């Protein structure tokens, strides 16, 4: 492993990933707000909010795949690898989902193969199962070892995580009435169910005193001033706490929305007037 101090400055920028993300932003503006709008002829230009969400999602995608975090994840730090998961699945994916106008998703639904597949993927149960399966596989030591040895595989697997995270978020923030969000009460159950499968494996990683990733990070972790067990426990703890903290915030927001809706229904029912029997005409 090359000592971090000897890495050139441009390596920390991961220029290939940076250029790819910038091209993605340029294509978004060209196809949805520029000369390429004939690709989606019936779609209005994205709103400022949608464009902001999408660009923020691309920034989060870059920070999760490249930059210093991407460099450290390639053999130096398991903690950096886990933070990649958090940023990709729980920050980049929902921002990209909210940043694409409804017409883009409708165009996808009209595709003969992708449309039915996407409709099935955004159903709550398949979305939860597939997302948690992919998330869990990404901490499997043999796969992680192969990812660290191949930048192409690392990028592919993290992009796959973003792809499966979008259907996972769909029941909570869907932009389409034809594929609507869950009722706020059901969203609470959905969020609770989504956090359960991660709890046990992440807790095992965070609490295990045996180095699970010695073959992957054994040579590089010392170069960042840590050791295998401490790095493993820190990465597992950060991921465990961050995931469930974010889910907790979403749970609270959806609970408050549900409470307001239920209060609105109660307030909308005409109240029966109470007549004082002592005050008769």
Image (tube, rainbow, N blue to C red):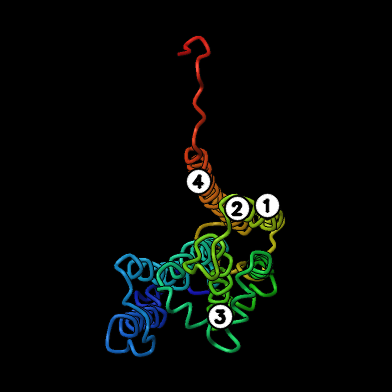
Q: Nearer the viewer, mark 4 or mark 2?
A: 4
Badge 2 crowding class, 10 Å Cα cut-off, few under 14, some 14 to 19, many 20 or more, is many
Where in the figure is residue 13, as x and y percent of width and height? Answer: 37, 74
Secondary element under disc 3, as helix, strand or loop, is helix
Which comes sooner in the sequence, label 4 or label 1?
1
Which comes sooner in the sequence, label 1 or label 3?
3
Q: Is residue 216 visible?
A: yes
Where in the figure is residue 237, as x and y percent of width and height? Answer: 59, 51
Q: Find the distance from the CA under tag 4 to the CA under tag 3.
A: 41 Å
Which comes sooner in the sequence, label 4 or label 2?
2
Q: Find the distance from the CA under tag 4 to the CA under tag 1.
A: 36 Å
Q: From the viewer's perspective, is residue 180 above or below residue 100?
A: above
Q: Find the distance from the CA under tag 1 to the CA under tag 2.
A: 7 Å
Secondary element under disc 2, as helix, strand or loop, is helix
Quick one: 79 or 98, which is closer to the camera? 98
State left or right for residue 35 relative to residue 109: left
Q: From the viewer's perspective, is residue 191 above or below residue 77?
A: above
Where in the figure is residue 126, as x and y percent of width and height? Answer: 68, 69
The residue singled out by tag 3 in the image is 156
Which comes sooner in the sequence, label 2 or label 3?
3
Q: Are marks 1 and 2 in contact (CB under 8 Å)?
A: yes
Q: Which mark is residue 240?
A: 2
The residue singled out by tag 1 in the image is 203
> In this view, which residue lies farthest toward the front?
281
Q: Find the distance from the CA under tag 2 to the CA under tag 3.
A: 23 Å
Quick one: 136 or 101, which is closer to the camera? 101
Residue at x 34% of width, y 74% of height: 9
Badge 3 crowding class, 10 Å Cα cut-off, few under 14, some 14 to 19, many 20 or more, is some
């Amino acid at each position: 492993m090359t000592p971090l101090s000897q890495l050139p400055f441009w390596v920390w920028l991961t220029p290939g990933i940076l250029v790819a993300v910038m091209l993605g932003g340029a294509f978004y503006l060209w196809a949805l707000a520029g000369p390429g709008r004939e690709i989606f002829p019936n779609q209005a230009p994205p709103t400022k909010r949608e464009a902001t969400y999408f660009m923020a999602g691309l920034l989060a995608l870059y920070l999760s795949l490249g930059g210093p975090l991407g460099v450290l994840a390639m053999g130096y730090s398991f903690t950096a690898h886990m933070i990649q998961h958090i940023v990709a699945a729980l920050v980049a994916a929902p921002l990209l989902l909210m940043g694409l106008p409804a017409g883009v998703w409708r165009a996808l639904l009209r595709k003969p193969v992708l449309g039915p597949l996407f409709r099935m993927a955004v159903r709550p149960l398949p979305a939860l199962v597939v997302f948690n399966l992919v998330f869990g596989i990404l901490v499997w030591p043999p796969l992680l070892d192969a990812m660290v040895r191949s930048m192409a595989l690392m990028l592919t697997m993290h992009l796959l995580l973003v792809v499966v995270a979008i259907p996972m978020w769909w029941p909570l923030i869907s932009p389409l009435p034809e594929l609507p969000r869950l009722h706020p009460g059901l969203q609470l159950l959905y969020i609770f169910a989504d956090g359960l499968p991660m709890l046990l494996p992440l807790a095992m990683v965070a609490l295990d005193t045996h180095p699970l990733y010695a073959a992957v990070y054994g040579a590089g972790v010392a170069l960042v001033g840590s050791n295998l067990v401490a790095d493993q426990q820190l990465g597992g703890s950060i991921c465990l706490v961050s995931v469930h903290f974010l889910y907790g915030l979403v749970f609270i927001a959806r609970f408050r929305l549900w409470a307001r809706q239920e209060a609105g229904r109660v307030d909308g029912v005409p109240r029966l007037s109470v007549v004082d029997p002592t005050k008769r005409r």
